[in-house]
Protein backbone atom coordinates (compact mmCIF):
# COMPACT_ATOMS: atom_id res chain seq x y z
CA UNK A 1 0.00 0.00 0.00
CA UNK A 2 2.17 2.83 -1.22
CA UNK A 3 2.15 5.41 -3.93
CA UNK A 4 -0.26 3.49 -6.08
CA UNK A 5 -2.84 3.26 -3.33
CA UNK A 6 -2.60 6.98 -2.66
CA UNK A 7 -2.86 7.74 -6.36
CA UNK A 8 -5.66 5.46 -7.39
CA UNK A 9 -7.59 4.23 -4.36
CA UNK A 10 -7.39 6.83 -1.63
CA UNK A 11 -9.32 9.61 -3.45
CA UNK A 12 -12.24 7.42 -4.55
CA UNK A 13 -12.49 5.79 -1.12
CA UNK A 14 -12.49 9.19 0.59
CA UNK A 15 -14.99 10.63 -1.86
CA UNK A 16 -17.25 7.60 -1.56
CA UNK A 17 -17.10 7.70 2.23
CA UNK A 18 -17.80 11.42 2.48
CA UNK A 19 -20.68 11.14 0.02
CA UNK A 20 -22.13 8.21 1.95
CA UNK A 21 -21.94 10.05 5.28
CA UNK A 22 -23.39 13.26 3.83
CA UNK A 23 -26.42 11.32 2.59
CA UNK A 24 -26.83 9.00 5.58
CA UNK A 25 -27.05 11.82 8.15
CA UNK A 26 -30.20 13.52 6.82
CA UNK A 27 -31.40 10.04 5.82
CA UNK A 28 -31.86 9.20 9.51
CA UNK A 29 -34.42 11.94 9.97
CA UNK A 30 -36.06 11.43 6.60
CA UNK A 31 -36.68 7.77 7.46
CA UNK A 32 -38.05 8.60 10.90
CA UNK A 33 -40.40 11.10 9.24
CA UNK A 34 -41.50 8.46 6.73
CA UNK A 35 -40.03 10.66 4.02
CA UNK A 36 -37.25 8.38 2.84
CA UNK A 37 -38.53 8.68 -0.71
CA UNK A 38 -37.61 12.36 -0.72
CA UNK A 39 -33.97 11.35 -1.01
CA UNK A 40 -34.91 9.10 -3.88
CA UNK A 41 -36.89 11.87 -5.52
CA UNK A 42 -34.09 14.41 -5.20
CA UNK A 43 -31.45 12.12 -6.60
CA UNK A 44 -33.63 11.38 -9.61
CA UNK A 45 -34.55 14.96 -10.43
CA UNK A 46 -30.91 15.94 -10.37
CA UNK A 47 -30.59 14.37 -13.83
CA UNK A 48 -32.96 16.71 -15.73
CA UNK A 49 -31.38 19.57 -13.77
CA UNK A 50 -27.88 18.92 -15.01
CA UNK A 51 -29.03 18.17 -18.55
CA UNK A 52 -30.86 21.50 -18.72
CA UNK A 53 -27.84 23.24 -17.22
CA UNK A 54 -25.66 21.66 -19.93
CA UNK A 55 -28.06 22.62 -22.73
CA UNK A 56 -28.15 26.20 -21.49
CA UNK A 57 -24.45 26.72 -20.86
CA UNK A 58 -22.92 24.19 -23.23
CA UNK A 59 -20.34 23.10 -20.67
CA UNK A 60 -20.05 20.46 -17.98
CA UNK A 61 -18.29 22.84 -15.62
CA UNK A 62 -19.08 22.13 -12.00
CA UNK A 63 -20.83 25.34 -11.13
CA UNK A 64 -23.63 25.30 -13.75
CA UNK A 65 -24.13 21.58 -13.09
CA UNK A 66 -24.56 22.18 -9.38
CA UNK A 67 -26.85 25.13 -9.96
CA UNK A 68 -28.96 23.07 -12.36
CA UNK A 69 -29.14 20.15 -9.94
CA UNK A 70 -29.99 22.38 -7.01
CA UNK A 71 -32.65 24.16 -9.03
CA UNK A 72 -34.20 20.87 -10.09
CA UNK A 73 -34.24 19.65 -6.49
CA UNK A 74 -36.03 22.83 -5.49
CA UNK A 75 -38.58 22.43 -8.29
CA UNK A 76 -39.21 18.85 -7.19
CA UNK A 77 -39.75 19.76 -3.54
CA UNK A 78 -42.22 22.48 -4.50
CA UNK A 79 -43.98 20.18 -7.00
CA UNK A 80 -44.37 17.46 -4.37
CA UNK A 81 -45.97 19.92 -1.95
CA UNK A 82 -48.29 21.30 -4.65
CA UNK A 83 -49.41 17.85 -5.80
CA UNK A 84 -49.93 16.72 -2.24
CA UNK A 85 -52.04 19.75 -1.34
CA UNK A 86 -54.05 20.03 -4.56
CA UNK A 87 -54.54 16.32 -5.14
CA UNK A 88 -55.02 15.55 -1.43
CA UNK A 89 -53.00 12.37 -1.89
CA UNK A 90 -50.45 10.89 0.45
CA UNK A 91 -46.89 12.22 0.29
CA UNK A 92 -45.43 8.94 -0.94
CA UNK A 93 -47.59 8.99 -4.05
CA UNK A 94 -46.86 12.66 -4.69
CA UNK A 95 -43.14 11.96 -4.48
CA UNK A 96 -43.43 8.94 -6.75
CA UNK A 97 -45.27 10.89 -9.42
CA UNK A 98 -42.86 13.80 -9.25
CA UNK A 99 -39.60 11.98 -9.43
CA UNK A 100 -40.47 9.37 -12.01
CA UNK A 101 -41.85 12.08 -14.30
CA UNK A 102 -38.89 14.38 -13.89
CA UNK A 103 -36.37 11.54 -14.21
CA UNK A 104 -38.06 10.32 -17.39
CA UNK A 105 -37.99 13.87 -18.73
CA UNK A 106 -34.28 13.97 -17.97
CA UNK A 107 -33.60 10.72 -19.83
CA UNK A 108 -35.59 11.92 -22.84
CA UNK A 109 -33.79 15.25 -22.87
CA UNK A 110 -30.47 13.47 -22.68
CA UNK A 111 -31.31 11.19 -25.61
CA UNK A 112 -32.67 13.91 -27.82
CA UNK A 113 -29.85 16.37 -27.29
CA UNK A 114 -26.31 16.07 -28.60
CA UNK A 115 -24.27 15.33 -25.54
CA UNK A 116 -22.03 12.78 -27.18
CA UNK A 117 -19.08 15.17 -27.17
CA UNK A 118 -18.99 15.29 -23.42
CA UNK A 119 -19.04 12.83 -20.59
CA UNK A 120 -22.74 13.05 -19.83
CA UNK A 121 -24.83 9.98 -20.24
CA UNK A 122 -27.35 7.87 -18.41
CA UNK A 123 -24.77 5.46 -17.11
CA UNK A 124 -22.73 8.30 -15.67
CA UNK A 125 -25.83 9.68 -14.05
CA UNK A 126 -26.56 6.38 -12.36
CA UNK A 127 -23.10 5.17 -11.49
CA UNK A 128 -20.97 8.31 -11.35
CA UNK A 129 -17.32 7.87 -12.16
CA UNK A 130 -15.77 7.07 -8.85
CA UNK A 131 -12.92 5.00 -10.32
CA UNK A 132 -11.75 7.83 -12.53
CA UNK A 133 -11.27 10.24 -9.62
CA UNK A 134 -7.55 9.62 -9.30
CA UNK A 135 -4.76 11.74 -7.91
CA UNK A 136 -1.91 11.48 -10.40
CA UNK A 137 0.17 14.17 -8.71
CA UNK A 138 0.62 12.00 -5.66
CA UNK A 139 3.87 10.15 -5.17
CA UNK A 140 3.03 8.53 -1.85
CA UNK A 141 1.62 9.31 1.57
CA UNK A 142 4.00 12.25 1.84
CA UNK A 143 2.04 14.02 -0.89
CA UNK A 144 -0.70 14.63 1.63
CA UNK A 145 1.57 17.30 3.13
CA UNK A 146 2.74 18.72 -0.19
CA UNK A 147 0.75 21.78 -1.34
CA UNK A 148 1.80 21.38 -4.95
CA UNK A 149 0.55 17.80 -5.07
CA UNK A 150 -2.61 18.63 -3.11
CA UNK A 151 -3.52 21.15 -5.78
CA UNK A 152 -3.87 18.23 -8.17
CA UNK A 153 -6.50 16.44 -6.11
CA UNK A 154 -9.65 15.67 -8.05
CA UNK A 155 -11.91 18.71 -7.47
CA UNK A 156 -14.74 16.41 -6.45
CA UNK A 157 -12.90 15.66 -3.20
CA UNK A 158 -12.84 19.16 -1.70
CA UNK A 159 -16.35 19.72 -2.99
CA UNK A 160 -17.86 16.67 -1.32
CA UNK A 161 -15.76 17.32 1.80
CA UNK A 162 -17.22 20.81 2.05
CA UNK A 163 -20.76 19.53 1.50
CA UNK A 164 -20.23 16.81 4.12
CA UNK A 165 -18.89 19.36 6.59
CA UNK A 166 -21.94 21.57 6.05
CA UNK A 167 -24.30 18.62 6.55
CA UNK A 168 -22.52 17.54 9.74
CA UNK A 169 -22.54 21.10 11.09
CA UNK A 170 -26.24 21.63 10.35
CA UNK A 171 -27.17 18.28 11.87
CA UNK A 172 -25.22 19.05 15.04
CA UNK A 173 -26.50 22.60 15.31
CA UNK A 174 -30.19 21.79 14.85
CA UNK A 175 -30.05 18.36 16.51
CA UNK A 176 -32.59 19.13 19.23
CA UNK A 177 -34.99 20.88 16.89
CA UNK A 178 -34.79 18.00 14.44
CA UNK A 179 -35.34 15.38 17.11
CA UNK A 180 -38.23 17.12 18.77
CA UNK A 181 -40.09 18.16 15.61
CA UNK A 182 -39.63 14.70 14.12
CA UNK A 183 -40.87 12.94 17.24
CA UNK A 184 -43.70 15.20 18.35
CA UNK A 185 -44.71 17.98 16.00
CA UNK A 186 -47.50 19.28 18.22
CA UNK A 187 -45.15 19.63 21.18
CA UNK A 188 -42.58 21.39 18.99
CA UNK A 189 -45.21 23.87 17.85
CA UNK A 190 -46.28 24.39 21.45
CA UNK A 191 -42.68 25.33 22.28
CA UNK A 192 -42.84 27.87 19.46
CA UNK A 193 -40.35 26.11 17.18
CA UNK A 194 -40.55 26.86 13.43
CA UNK A 195 -41.69 23.34 12.55
CA UNK A 196 -42.35 24.02 8.88
CA UNK A 197 -38.98 25.67 8.38
CA UNK A 198 -37.22 22.78 10.11
CA UNK A 199 -38.85 20.30 7.73
CA UNK A 200 -37.90 22.37 4.69
CA UNK A 201 -34.38 22.84 6.03
CA UNK A 202 -33.99 19.09 6.38
CA UNK A 203 -35.11 18.51 2.81
CA UNK A 204 -32.80 21.29 1.61
CA UNK A 205 -29.89 19.68 3.46
CA UNK A 206 -30.72 16.34 1.89
CA UNK A 207 -30.81 18.07 -1.50
CA UNK A 208 -27.38 19.58 -0.87
CA UNK A 209 -25.98 16.17 0.01
CA UNK A 210 -27.64 14.54 -2.99
CA UNK A 211 -26.41 17.15 -5.46
CA UNK A 212 -22.85 17.15 -4.14
CA UNK A 213 -22.71 13.35 -4.02
CA UNK A 214 -24.32 12.90 -7.41
CA UNK A 215 -21.54 14.91 -8.99
CA UNK A 216 -18.99 12.36 -7.82
CA UNK A 217 -20.71 9.05 -7.37
CA UNK A 218 -24.03 9.03 -9.25
CA UNK A 219 -27.56 8.59 -8.06
CA UNK A 220 -27.41 4.89 -7.13
CA UNK A 221 -25.16 5.55 -4.14
CA UNK A 222 -27.19 8.58 -3.20
CA UNK A 223 -30.44 6.61 -3.03
CA UNK A 224 -28.83 3.68 -1.24
CA UNK A 225 -27.07 5.87 1.32
CA UNK A 226 -30.17 7.88 2.18
CA UNK A 227 -31.97 4.69 3.12
CA UNK A 228 -29.82 1.65 3.87
CA UNK A 229 -27.38 2.82 6.59
CA UNK A 230 -30.04 4.66 8.65
CA UNK A 231 -32.56 1.84 8.28
CA UNK A 232 -29.97 -0.73 9.37
CA UNK A 233 -28.89 1.54 12.22
CA UNK A 234 -32.48 1.82 13.48
CA UNK A 235 -32.45 -1.94 14.01
CA UNK A 236 -29.38 -1.70 16.24
CA UNK A 237 -30.62 0.62 18.98
CA UNK A 238 -33.47 2.54 20.59
CA UNK A 239 -31.47 5.73 21.07
CA UNK A 240 -31.36 8.38 18.36
CA UNK A 241 -27.77 9.39 19.14
CA UNK A 242 -26.62 5.79 18.85
CA UNK A 243 -28.65 5.23 15.70
CA UNK A 244 -26.98 8.16 13.95
CA UNK A 245 -23.55 6.93 15.03
CA UNK A 246 -24.31 3.46 13.64
CA UNK A 247 -25.54 4.96 10.39
CA UNK A 248 -22.25 6.82 9.92
CA UNK A 249 -20.35 3.62 10.67
CA UNK A 250 -22.45 1.63 8.19
CA UNK A 251 -22.06 4.32 5.53
CA UNK A 252 -18.29 4.28 5.95
CA UNK A 253 -18.15 0.50 5.92
CA UNK A 254 -20.27 0.37 2.76
CA UNK A 255 -18.06 2.86 0.95
CA UNK A 256 -14.74 1.26 1.88
CA UNK A 257 -15.80 -2.36 1.56
CA UNK A 258 -17.77 -1.63 -1.62
CA UNK A 259 -14.81 0.02 -3.28
CA UNK A 260 -12.40 -2.75 -2.32
CA UNK A 261 -14.81 -5.53 -3.36
CA UNK A 262 -15.51 -3.84 -6.68
CA UNK A 263 -11.81 -3.51 -7.45
CA UNK A 264 -10.55 -6.86 -6.20
CA UNK A 265 -13.59 -9.08 -5.72
CA UNK A 266 -13.88 -10.09 -9.38
CA UNK A 267 -10.14 -10.82 -9.49
CA UNK A 268 -10.48 -13.10 -6.51
CA UNK A 269 -13.29 -14.85 -8.35
CA UNK A 270 -11.12 -15.17 -11.45
CA UNK A 271 -12.73 -12.44 -13.54
CA UNK A 272 -10.31 -10.04 -15.20
CA UNK A 273 -12.41 -6.86 -14.93
CA UNK A 274 -13.43 -4.85 -11.93
CA UNK A 275 -17.11 -3.97 -11.49
CA UNK A 276 -18.64 -0.55 -10.81
CA UNK A 277 -17.57 0.73 -7.41
CA UNK A 278 -20.76 2.77 -7.00
CA UNK A 279 -22.89 -0.27 -7.71
CA UNK A 280 -20.88 -2.40 -5.30
CA UNK A 281 -21.09 0.22 -2.54
CA UNK A 282 -24.87 0.21 -2.90
CA UNK A 283 -24.92 -3.61 -2.83
CA UNK A 284 -22.81 -3.70 0.35
CA UNK A 285 -25.14 -1.22 2.06
CA UNK A 286 -28.08 -3.40 1.08
CA UNK A 287 -26.32 -6.47 2.48
CA UNK A 288 -25.70 -4.65 5.76
CA UNK A 289 -29.39 -3.79 5.95
CA UNK A 290 -30.31 -7.42 5.28
CA UNK A 291 -27.97 -8.59 8.06
CA UNK A 292 -29.41 -6.00 10.44
CA UNK A 293 -32.92 -7.24 9.61
CA UNK A 294 -31.86 -10.78 10.45
CA UNK A 295 -29.65 -10.15 13.48
CA UNK A 296 -30.16 -6.55 14.67
CA UNK A 297 -30.88 -6.47 18.42
CA UNK A 298 -33.88 -4.15 18.09
CA UNK A 299 -35.54 -5.72 15.07
CA UNK A 300 -38.68 -6.75 16.97
CA UNK A 301 -40.43 -3.93 18.69
CA UNK A 302 -43.54 -5.16 20.36
CA UNK A 303 -44.89 -1.77 21.35
CA UNK A 304 -45.19 -0.37 17.87
CA UNK A 305 -48.93 -0.94 17.71
CA UNK A 306 -49.99 0.31 21.14
CA UNK A 307 -50.63 3.96 20.44
CA UNK A 308 -52.28 5.56 17.47
CA UNK A 309 -54.40 8.55 16.52
CA UNK B 1 -43.83 11.03 52.49
CA UNK B 2 -41.67 13.99 51.59
CA UNK B 3 -40.61 14.45 48.00
CA UNK B 4 -36.88 14.14 47.30
CA UNK B 5 -35.00 17.38 47.76
CA UNK B 6 -33.92 17.42 44.13
CA UNK B 7 -37.52 17.54 43.02
CA UNK B 8 -38.20 21.06 44.19
CA UNK B 9 -35.07 22.36 42.61
CA UNK B 10 -35.90 20.37 39.55
CA UNK B 11 -39.38 21.48 38.71
CA UNK B 12 -38.97 25.17 39.46
CA UNK B 13 -35.30 26.02 39.43
CA UNK B 14 -35.97 28.98 41.65
CA UNK B 15 -38.82 30.47 39.64
CA UNK B 16 -41.48 28.96 41.82
CA UNK B 17 -44.91 29.32 43.24
CA UNK B 18 -45.09 33.08 43.63
CA UNK B 19 -45.02 33.34 39.82
CA UNK B 20 -48.77 33.87 39.54
CA UNK B 21 -49.81 36.86 41.59
CA UNK B 22 -53.29 37.92 42.60
CA UNK B 23 -56.49 37.28 40.72
CA UNK B 24 -54.76 37.37 37.32
CA UNK B 25 -56.12 34.89 34.81
CA UNK B 26 -53.77 32.08 33.90
CA UNK B 27 -55.41 31.72 30.50
CA UNK B 28 -57.90 34.13 28.97
CA UNK B 29 -59.65 33.36 25.69
CA UNK B 30 -61.67 36.03 23.89
CA UNK B 31 -63.88 35.38 20.86
CA UNK B 32 -61.99 32.30 19.72
CA UNK B 33 -63.24 30.75 16.49
CA UNK B 34 -61.51 27.77 14.87
CA UNK B 35 -62.52 25.95 11.73
CA UNK B 36 -61.13 22.92 9.91
CA UNK B 37 -63.36 23.29 6.87
CA UNK B 38 -66.64 25.10 6.34
CA UNK B 39 -68.26 24.61 9.74
CA UNK B 40 -66.50 25.95 12.82
CA UNK B 41 -65.27 23.43 15.42
CA UNK B 42 -65.13 26.16 18.05
CA UNK B 43 -67.28 29.25 17.67
CA UNK B 44 -66.85 32.54 19.45
CA UNK B 45 -65.59 31.04 22.66
CA UNK B 46 -64.77 33.11 25.73
CA UNK B 47 -63.16 31.58 28.77
CA UNK B 48 -61.13 32.75 31.72
CA UNK B 49 -59.18 30.11 33.59
CA UNK B 50 -58.02 31.51 36.92
CA UNK B 51 -54.52 31.14 38.34
CA UNK B 52 -53.89 28.75 41.24
CA UNK B 53 -56.94 26.74 40.23
CA UNK B 54 -57.88 23.38 38.74
CA UNK B 55 -60.20 23.95 35.80
CA UNK B 56 -62.09 21.39 33.73
CA UNK B 57 -63.29 21.63 30.15
CA UNK B 58 -66.25 19.29 29.62
CA UNK B 59 -68.42 18.57 26.64
CA UNK B 60 -69.45 15.74 24.33
CA UNK B 61 -67.18 14.09 21.75
CA UNK B 62 -66.51 16.49 18.92
CA UNK B 63 -67.42 19.51 21.04
CA UNK B 64 -64.13 21.17 20.14
CA UNK B 65 -62.34 20.73 23.48
CA UNK B 66 -59.07 19.55 21.98
CA UNK B 67 -59.40 22.13 19.24
CA UNK B 68 -59.82 24.90 21.80
CA UNK B 69 -56.61 23.93 23.61
CA UNK B 70 -54.57 23.51 20.45
CA UNK B 71 -55.75 26.80 18.99
CA UNK B 72 -55.13 28.59 22.28
CA UNK B 73 -51.54 27.34 22.16
CA UNK B 74 -51.14 28.21 18.50
CA UNK B 75 -50.57 24.58 17.49
CA UNK B 76 -53.36 25.01 14.94
CA UNK B 77 -54.34 28.33 13.34
CA UNK B 78 -57.37 30.23 14.57
CA UNK B 79 -59.85 32.12 12.45
CA UNK B 80 -60.26 34.87 15.02
CA UNK B 81 -59.90 35.53 18.70
CA UNK B 82 -57.32 36.55 21.24
CA UNK B 83 -55.61 34.36 23.79
CA UNK B 84 -53.48 35.60 26.64
CA UNK B 85 -51.61 33.70 29.33
CA UNK B 86 -50.84 35.59 32.53
CA UNK B 87 -51.83 38.78 30.75
CA UNK B 88 -49.46 38.38 27.80
CA UNK B 89 -49.97 36.97 24.31
CA UNK B 90 -49.38 33.23 24.33
CA UNK B 91 -46.42 33.54 21.96
CA UNK B 92 -44.59 35.55 24.62
CA UNK B 93 -45.52 33.25 27.50
CA UNK B 94 -44.57 29.91 26.02
CA UNK B 95 -42.00 29.01 28.62
CA UNK B 96 -44.74 29.27 31.25
CA UNK B 97 -47.10 26.83 29.50
CA UNK B 98 -46.92 23.05 29.31
CA UNK B 99 -49.28 21.04 27.12
CA UNK B 100 -50.06 17.33 27.21
CA UNK B 101 -52.02 16.29 24.11
CA UNK B 102 -54.82 13.70 24.05
CA UNK B 103 -53.18 10.32 23.31
CA UNK B 104 -50.07 12.05 22.04
CA UNK B 105 -49.93 11.75 18.29
CA UNK B 106 -46.26 10.86 18.27
CA UNK B 107 -44.33 8.21 16.40
CA UNK B 108 -44.28 5.38 18.95
CA UNK B 109 -41.56 3.66 16.97
CA UNK B 110 -39.20 6.60 17.40
CA UNK B 111 -35.80 5.72 18.91
CA UNK B 112 -36.37 7.40 22.26
CA UNK B 113 -36.64 6.14 25.83
CA UNK B 114 -39.04 7.43 28.46
CA UNK B 115 -36.11 9.40 29.87
CA UNK B 116 -35.38 10.95 26.46
CA UNK B 117 -38.99 12.08 26.16
CA UNK B 118 -38.99 13.73 29.58
CA UNK B 119 -35.66 15.40 28.75
CA UNK B 120 -37.41 17.11 25.83
CA UNK B 121 -39.37 19.06 28.45
CA UNK B 122 -36.07 20.75 29.39
CA UNK B 123 -35.08 21.73 25.84
CA UNK B 124 -36.42 25.23 26.16
CA UNK B 125 -34.24 25.84 29.20
CA UNK B 126 -31.19 24.09 27.73
CA UNK B 127 -31.35 25.96 24.44
CA UNK B 128 -30.22 24.63 21.11
CA UNK B 129 -26.73 23.61 22.12
CA UNK B 130 -26.69 23.65 25.94
CA UNK B 131 -25.19 20.54 27.48
CA UNK B 132 -27.20 17.92 29.32
CA UNK B 133 -25.93 18.16 32.88
CA UNK B 134 -26.29 15.92 35.91
CA UNK B 135 -28.90 18.33 37.25
CA UNK B 136 -30.96 17.82 34.09
CA UNK B 137 -30.71 14.06 34.49
CA UNK B 138 -31.84 14.34 38.11
CA UNK B 139 -34.80 16.47 37.04
CA UNK B 140 -35.81 13.81 34.53
CA UNK B 141 -35.61 11.09 37.17
CA UNK B 142 -37.54 13.17 39.72
CA UNK B 143 -40.32 13.95 37.24
CA UNK B 144 -40.64 10.30 36.23
CA UNK B 145 -40.72 9.39 39.91
CA UNK B 146 -43.48 11.90 40.55
CA UNK B 147 -45.77 10.05 38.14
CA UNK B 148 -44.67 6.64 39.39
CA UNK B 149 -42.58 5.79 36.33
CA UNK B 150 -39.09 5.85 37.86
CA UNK B 151 -38.41 2.26 36.87
CA UNK B 152 -39.09 2.85 33.19
CA UNK B 153 -36.54 5.54 32.38
CA UNK B 154 -34.64 3.37 29.91
CA UNK B 155 -37.65 1.79 28.22
CA UNK B 156 -38.37 2.58 24.58
CA UNK B 157 -41.60 4.57 24.55
CA UNK B 158 -43.42 2.22 22.19
CA UNK B 159 -42.85 -0.58 24.68
CA UNK B 160 -44.92 1.11 27.39
CA UNK B 161 -48.62 0.55 27.97
CA UNK B 162 -51.08 3.31 27.05
CA UNK B 163 -51.44 4.50 30.63
CA UNK B 164 -47.68 4.45 31.14
CA UNK B 165 -47.18 6.47 27.96
CA UNK B 166 -49.71 8.99 29.25
CA UNK B 167 -47.73 9.34 32.47
CA UNK B 168 -44.44 9.83 30.63
CA UNK B 169 -45.96 12.74 28.74
CA UNK B 170 -47.24 14.17 32.01
CA UNK B 171 -43.70 13.84 33.40
CA UNK B 172 -42.38 15.75 30.39
CA UNK B 173 -44.85 18.56 31.19
CA UNK B 174 -43.67 18.55 34.81
CA UNK B 175 -40.08 18.87 33.63
CA UNK B 176 -41.05 22.03 31.77
CA UNK B 177 -41.64 23.64 35.16
CA UNK B 178 -44.51 25.67 33.74
CA UNK B 179 -47.04 27.82 35.56
CA UNK B 180 -49.96 26.74 33.40
CA UNK B 181 -50.65 23.10 32.53
CA UNK B 182 -52.99 22.28 29.66
CA UNK B 183 -53.93 18.61 29.71
CA UNK B 184 -56.15 16.94 27.14
CA UNK B 185 -57.91 14.02 28.84
CA UNK B 186 -55.15 13.11 31.29
CA UNK B 187 -57.27 10.25 32.67
CA UNK B 188 -58.22 8.61 29.40
CA UNK B 189 -57.52 4.89 29.53
CA UNK B 190 -55.73 4.86 32.89
CA UNK B 191 -56.66 2.62 35.80
CA UNK B 192 -58.09 3.87 39.10
CA UNK B 193 -54.75 3.81 40.91
CA UNK B 194 -53.07 5.77 38.13
CA UNK B 195 -55.92 8.28 38.05
CA UNK B 196 -55.43 8.76 41.78
CA UNK B 197 -51.68 9.27 41.27
CA UNK B 198 -52.20 11.77 38.46
CA UNK B 199 -54.82 13.79 40.32
CA UNK B 200 -52.48 13.99 43.32
CA UNK B 201 -49.74 15.36 41.09
CA UNK B 202 -52.11 17.92 39.59
CA UNK B 203 -53.42 19.01 42.97
CA UNK B 204 -49.84 19.38 44.18
CA UNK B 205 -49.18 21.66 41.20
CA UNK B 206 -52.24 23.69 42.10
CA UNK B 207 -51.10 23.95 45.72
CA UNK B 208 -47.75 25.25 44.50
CA UNK B 209 -49.64 28.09 42.83
CA UNK B 210 -49.82 26.79 39.29
CA UNK B 211 -52.91 26.64 37.12
CA UNK B 212 -54.21 23.36 35.68
CA UNK B 213 -56.70 23.19 32.81
CA UNK B 214 -57.80 19.67 31.90
CA UNK B 215 -60.25 18.31 29.36
CA UNK B 216 -62.32 15.88 31.39
CA UNK B 217 -64.94 13.33 30.43
CA UNK B 218 -65.96 11.73 33.72
CA UNK B 219 -68.79 14.00 34.86
CA UNK B 220 -69.04 12.17 38.19
CA UNK B 221 -65.65 13.46 39.32
CA UNK B 222 -65.85 17.04 38.07
CA UNK B 223 -66.97 18.44 41.40
CA UNK B 224 -64.40 16.42 43.34
CA UNK B 225 -61.39 17.26 41.19
CA UNK B 226 -61.99 20.77 39.91
CA UNK B 227 -62.89 24.22 41.19
CA UNK B 228 -63.65 25.86 37.86
CA UNK B 229 -65.42 24.51 34.80
CA UNK B 230 -65.97 25.44 31.15
CA UNK B 231 -68.84 23.57 29.49
CA UNK B 232 -68.34 23.57 25.76
CA UNK B 233 -70.30 22.40 22.77
CA UNK B 234 -68.73 24.29 19.89
CA UNK B 235 -69.93 27.42 21.72
CA UNK B 236 -69.31 27.87 25.41
CA UNK B 237 -72.50 26.89 27.31
CA UNK B 238 -71.50 27.79 30.84
CA UNK B 239 -68.39 28.85 32.68
CA UNK B 240 -67.53 29.65 36.26
CA UNK B 241 -66.90 28.09 39.65
CA UNK B 242 -68.08 24.47 39.71
CA UNK B 243 -70.68 25.20 42.42
CA UNK B 244 -72.50 27.74 40.28
CA UNK B 245 -71.76 26.76 36.69
CA UNK B 246 -72.04 22.97 36.81
CA UNK B 247 -75.84 22.78 36.87
CA UNK B 248 -78.46 20.43 35.47
CA UNK B 249 -79.56 23.03 32.92
CA UNK B 250 -76.01 23.62 31.77
CA UNK B 251 -75.36 19.87 31.44
CA UNK B 252 -78.60 19.51 29.54
CA UNK B 253 -77.66 22.30 27.16
CA UNK B 254 -74.11 21.02 26.72
CA UNK B 255 -75.01 17.43 26.03
CA UNK B 256 -78.21 18.22 24.13
CA UNK B 257 -80.47 16.25 26.45
CA UNK B 258 -78.52 13.08 25.88
CA UNK B 259 -77.85 12.58 29.58
CA UNK B 260 -80.62 10.76 31.48
CA UNK B 261 -82.31 12.91 34.10
CA UNK B 262 -81.60 10.48 36.93
CA UNK B 263 -77.93 10.38 36.07
CA UNK B 264 -77.84 14.15 36.07
CA UNK B 265 -79.45 14.36 39.49
CA UNK B 266 -76.73 12.24 41.00
CA UNK B 267 -74.08 14.47 39.45
CA UNK B 268 -75.51 17.67 40.78
CA UNK B 269 -76.14 16.13 44.21
CA UNK B 270 -72.47 15.54 44.40
CA UNK B 271 -71.96 19.30 44.32
CA UNK B 272 -74.02 19.96 47.43
N1 LIG C 1 -57.66 17.55 11.94
C1 LIG C 1 -59.00 17.74 11.76
N2 LIG C 1 -59.50 17.93 10.51
C2 LIG C 1 -60.81 18.12 10.31
N3 LIG C 1 -61.72 18.13 11.29
C3 LIG C 1 -61.30 17.94 12.54
C4 LIG C 1 -59.91 17.74 12.85
N4 LIG C 1 -59.79 17.58 14.18
C5 LIG C 1 -61.03 17.68 14.68
N5 LIG C 1 -61.94 17.89 13.71
C6 LIG C 1 -63.39 18.10 13.92
O1 LIG C 1 -63.55 19.20 14.76
C7 LIG C 1 -64.54 18.93 15.74
C8 LIG C 1 -63.97 19.09 17.13
O2 LIG C 1 -62.96 18.14 17.34
P1 LIG C 1 -62.16 18.02 18.70
O3 LIG C 1 -61.09 17.03 18.54
O4 LIG C 1 -61.77 19.38 19.15
O5 LIG C 1 -63.29 17.46 19.67
P2 LIG C 1 -63.17 17.04 21.20
O6 LIG C 1 -64.13 17.88 21.94
O7 LIG C 1 -61.77 17.08 21.64
O8 LIG C 1 -63.73 15.55 21.16
P3 LIG C 1 -63.28 14.25 21.98
O9 LIG C 1 -64.04 14.30 23.26
O10 LIG C 1 -63.75 13.12 21.15
O11 LIG C 1 -61.82 14.29 22.16
C9 LIG C 1 -65.04 17.52 15.45
O12 LIG C 1 -66.26 17.62 14.76
C10 LIG C 1 -63.99 16.91 14.60
O13 LIG C 1 -64.56 16.02 13.69
MG1 LIG D 1 -60.41 15.69 22.22
Image (tube, coloured by chain):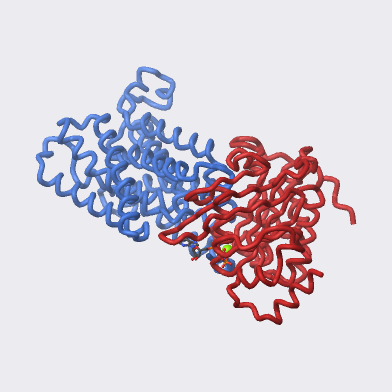
**Colour in which the image shows chain B:** red
Task: Name the residue rendered at 45%, 53% in the picture.
Answer: A31
The correct choice, above or below, for B235 with respect to A18 in the image is below
Task: Name the residue rendered at 55%, 59% in the picture.
Answer: B105
Residue A309 location (% of width, % of height): 53, 65
Q: Quadrant of the C terminus of chain B?
A: bottom right
Q: Quadrant of residue B94?
A: top right
Q: Going by the picture, which residue comes out furthest to the right?
A: B1
The correct choice, above or below, for A288 with respect to B176 in the image is below
The correct choice, above or below, for A169 with respect to B263 in the image is above
Q: Is residue A68 left or right of residue A84?
A: left
Residue B113 location (% of width, % of height): 64, 55
Q: Quadrant of residue A85?
A: bottom left
Q: Quadrant of residue B157?
A: bottom right
User: Observer-nearest residue: B228 or B171?
Assistant: B228
User: Observer-nearest residue: A132 or B97?
Assistant: B97
Q: Is residue A61 left or right of residue B252?
A: left
From this viewpoint, is residue B4 visible? yes
Task: Name the residue rendered at 53%, 63% in the picture.
Answer: A299
Q: Going by the picture, which residue comes out furthest to the top?
A: A148
Q: Which chain is blue?
A: A
Q: Going by the picture, which residue comes out furthest to the front?
A: B249
Task: Name the residue rendered at 61%, 70% in the picture.
Answer: B253
Residue A111 location (% of width, % of height): 12, 46
Amino acid sequence: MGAEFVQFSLPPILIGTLAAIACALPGNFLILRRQALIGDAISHVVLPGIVVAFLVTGTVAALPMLVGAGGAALVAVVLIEVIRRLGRIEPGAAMGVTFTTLFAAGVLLLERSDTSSVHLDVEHALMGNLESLVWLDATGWASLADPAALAGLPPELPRIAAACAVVVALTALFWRWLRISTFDEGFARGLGLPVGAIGLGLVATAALAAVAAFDAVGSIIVIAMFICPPAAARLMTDRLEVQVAWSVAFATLSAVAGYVLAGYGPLWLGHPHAVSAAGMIAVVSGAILALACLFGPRRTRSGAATGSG
Amino acid sequence: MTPPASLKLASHEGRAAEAAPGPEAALAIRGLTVSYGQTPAVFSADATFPARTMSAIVGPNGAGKSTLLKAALGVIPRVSGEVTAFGRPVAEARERIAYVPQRASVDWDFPATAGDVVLMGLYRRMGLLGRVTGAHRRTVRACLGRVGMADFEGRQIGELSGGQQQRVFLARALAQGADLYLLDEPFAGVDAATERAIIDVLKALRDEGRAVVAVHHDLSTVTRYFEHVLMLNVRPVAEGPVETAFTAEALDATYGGRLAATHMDSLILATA
